[in-house]
């Protein structure tokens, strides 16, 4: 066998599982310039999914092994064939019911290194128990907490940029005479006009009093 060619497990292949390295193969260069960066999803760890068909086959095989042991024992005892069939069928039904009821619950122990599908299934169940113990949601994605923080920082920066634009517009209106400065200038001009009108009325009043006093002196 050569690299990237062969079976996922040497079990049942009649080989030792040794994979010869292909010295003629060139690894694809997908890192660094001028190549585009790798997708983050491809770099994320993905657990190996077990083959449920093989796991189901192994469980049924264990049941059949126990049934065969019972049959061998009854045949040695000289039990009638019909009785042997009845007892084997009853044992098979009982073991299958227990297997379906158990459903592989609980951690599996004493697994061998070549039991790759059993190990993968045990790892997935262990991760599921840990998730339930820590009360982590099923739709949780790795790194989502940091992404939410980055989004909050980005929104805060956008708000700050919007506030800076409003301030610059306010300054521009003030310098062009369209803002509050114009209102203040108009207020000062109005106050000058009102004060000038009051001064004119005061002068007219004083002249009227002087004229009345002068006519009184002439009469005397």
Image: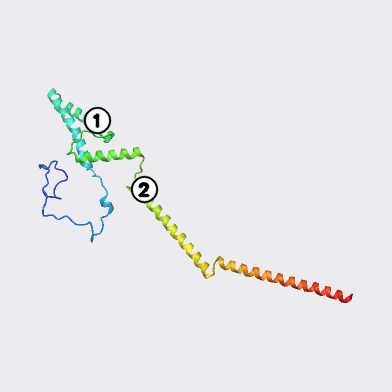
What residue do we see at 52% from left, 67% from top?
174
Q: Outermost residue toward the top?
A: 77
Label 2: element kind: helix
Q: Name the residue under label 1.
A: 94
Where is residue 150? Give x, y as percent.
Answer: 37, 52
Question: Residue at horizontal 45%, vertical 60%?
Answer: 162
Mark 2 — residue?
145
Where is 187 relative to 117, above or below?
A: below
Q: Which residue is drawn at 68% across and 71% down?
A: 196
Q: How crowded is mark 2: few (under 14 residues within 10 Å), some or many (20 or more)?
A: few
Q: In the orientation shown, which residue stands out farthest toward the right?
A: 220
The residue shown at (51%, 68%) is 175
181 relative to 6, above or below: below
Q: Earlier in the sequence, mark 2 or mark 1?
A: 1
Looking at the rendered image, the disc whose residue lies closer to the viewer, 2 or 1, is: 2
Name, please, the residue furthest toward the bottom: 218
Question: How far apart are the alpha carbons under marks 2 and 1?
Answer: 48 Å
Q: How is the image coloured?
A: rainbow
Q: In this view, does 193 lie to the left or right of 52?
A: right
């Amino acid at each position: 066998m050569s690299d990237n060619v062969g079976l996922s497990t040497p079990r049942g292949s009649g080989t030792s599982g040794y994979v010869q390295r292909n010295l003629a193969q060139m690894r694809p260069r997908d890192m660094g310039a001028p190549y585009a960066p790798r997708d983050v999803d491809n770099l994320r760890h993905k657990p190996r999914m077990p083959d449920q068909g093989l796991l189901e086959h192994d469980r049924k095989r264990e049941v059949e092994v126990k049934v065969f042991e019972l049959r061998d024992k009854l045949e040695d005892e000289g039990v009638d064939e019909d009785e042997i069939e009845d007892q084997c069928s009853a044992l098979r039904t009982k073991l299958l019911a227990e297997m379906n009821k158990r459903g592989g619950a609980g951690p599996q122990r004493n697994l061998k290194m070549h039991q790759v599908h059993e190990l993968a299934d045990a790892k997935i169940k262990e991760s599921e128990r840990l998730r339930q113990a820590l009360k982590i949601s099923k739709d949780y994605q790795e790194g989502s907490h940091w992404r939410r923080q980055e989004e909050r920082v980005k929104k805060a920066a956008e708000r700050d940029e919007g506030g800076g634009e409003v301030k610059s517009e306010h300054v521009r209106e003030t310098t062009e005479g369209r803002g509050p400065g114009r209102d203040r200038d108009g207020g000062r001009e109005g106050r000058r006009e009102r004060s000038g009108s009051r001064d004119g009325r005061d002068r007219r009043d004083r002249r009227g009093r002087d004229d009345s006093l002068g006519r009184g002196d002439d009469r005397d």
